[in-house]
Amino acid sequence: FKKVDLIILDEMGYIPFSKDGAELLFQLITDWYEQKSLIITSNLEFSQWNRIFVDARLTAALVDRVIHHAHILSFTGNSYRVTHALSNYPS
């Protein structure tokens, strides 16, 4: 990771983290904090991240680091994938 400037974590929350996995990700994000650009995609609001990380304090600290200096984009409405798939489904 020392050679890259941008790290993308796609579908955060799709699969919950184990305690060890959550702690490792927290350590990585702490190391990258203010050093690397980070893009995270998730279908969960930050308030729901307790579902994917075991420890509420770790989750709060992780969210704190992620949102500091962040540009947060929130998309609402129908899923493009679902809409596209349904439009191609024969009636």
Image: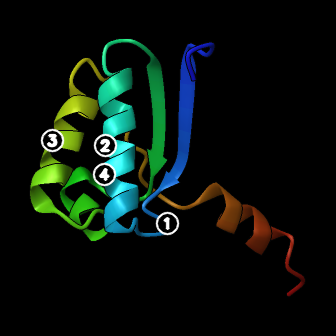
Name the residue tied to disc 2: 26
Q: Where's residue 21, x and y in %?
A: 40, 58
Closest to the camera, between mark 4 and mark 1, is 4
Kind of residue at badge 2:
Phe
Dot 1 surroundings within 10 Å: few (below 14), some, or many (20 or more)? few
- Write down the quadrant of residue 53 in the picture: bottom left
Dot 3 surroundings within 10 Å: few (below 14), some, or many (20 or more)? few
Report the side of 61 relative to 40 (left or right). left
Report the side of 38 relative to 23 (left or right). right
Q: Secondary structure at mark 2?
A: helix
Name the residue tied to disc 3: 61
Q: Nearer the viewer, residue 91 or 54?
A: 54
* Number of marks in picture: 4
Rounded to the nearest angstrom, the CA distance separating label 3 from label 2 is 8 Å
Q: Where's residue 47, x and y in %?
A: 18, 57
Q: Are marks 3 and 2 in contact (CB under 8 Å)?
A: yes
Q: Are marks 4 and 1 in contact (CB under 8 Å)?
A: no
Rounded to the nearest angstrom, the CA distance separating label 2 from label 1 is 17 Å
Name the residue tied to disc 1: 14
Rounded to the nearest angstrom, the CA distance separating label 2 from label 4 is 5 Å
Kind of residue at badge 4:
Glu
Q: Where's residue 42, x and y in %?
A: 44, 52
Residue at x-position 62% and y-position 13%: 3
Q: Are marks 2 and 4 in contact (CB under 8 Å)?
A: yes
